[in-house]
Amino acid sequence: MQLREFFSEEGISLALKGRTKNDILRELVELLHLDDKSQGMLLKMLQRRENLGSTGIGRGIAIPHCRSLVVSKLRVAFGRKAEGIEFKAIDEKPAFFFFLIVAPPLEVSNQYLPVLGKIAQFAKEEDVPRRLLDIQTPADFLKLVEEKGL
């Protein structure tokens, strides 16, 4: 399983507009192209998850994630906010890069935790935050993920 398999250009935004954590979560959910009702339900689930503890892992990176009935298979999205926003990250610094992961409650393929782990591993690579700031297109993002071979 390669991390690249889970991302598509339609699920990538390099210019998130939100100014708050909830704005960013809403934009990430929109990248999954679900119907309005499903988007609303998923946003509530992600907000509940964030209330338990921030998914901001530091180094400018957040990985909001949850399980939800609104998806039938694991879905991911990526968003970038060049100015960064307060996300209550563990290092208390703004978040710039957001990796959304949503999986169904009963997932036969059991990819949720491995994908979460691979994204965390990708994020810990020394050059990744700088390179994520430099990418110009969704295709550049996909190339970077592929290049890291995770």
Image: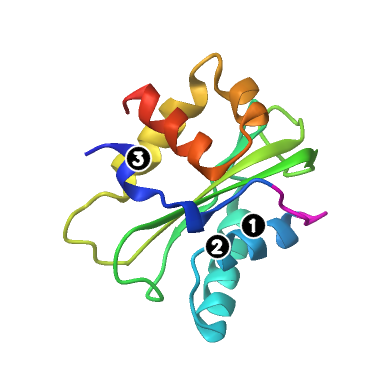
Q: Do the residues labelled 3 and 2 touch (CB within 8 Å)?
A: no
Q: Nearer the viewer, residue 58 or 23?
A: 23
Q: Residue 18 magenta-drawn?
A: yes
The C terminus lies in which quarter of the figure?
A: top left
Above/below status of 132 relative to 30 = above
Q: Give the quadrant of residue 88.
A: top right
Mark 3 residue crowding within 10 angstroms, few (<14) / some (14–19) / many (20+): some
The image position of residue 135, as x and y in percent, is 61, 32
Question: Residue at horizontal 43%, vertical 32%?
Answer: 143
* SS at badge 2: loop
Q: Nearer the viewer, mark 3 or mark 1?
A: 3
Q: Which amino acid does label 2 sit on?
A: Leu
Above/below status of 113 relative to 136 = below
Q: Residue 2 magenta-drawn?
A: no
On residue 51, the disc is: 1
* SS at badge 3: helix
Mark 1 residue crowding within 10 angstroms, few (<14) / some (14–19) / many (20+): few
Bounds of the magenta segment: 15-20
Q: Which amino acid does label 1 sit on?
A: Asn
The N terminus lies in which quarter of the figure?
A: top left
Q: Which residue lies furthest to the top in this view?
A: 126
Q: What residue type is labelled 3?
A: Arg
The image position of residue 106, as x and y in percent, is 24, 66
Which circle's residue, 3 or 1, is located before the other in the chain? 3
Mark 2 residue crowding within 10 angstroms, few (<14) / some (14–19) / many (20+): some
The image position of residue 34, as x and y in percent, is 48, 76
Main SS of the magenta part reads loop
Which circle's residue, 2 or 1, is located before the other in the chain? 2
Question: Residue at horizontal 50%, vertical 82%?
Answer: 35
Q: Name the residue under label 3.
A: 4
Q: Name the residue under label 2.
A: 31
Q: Residue furthest bottom?
A: 37
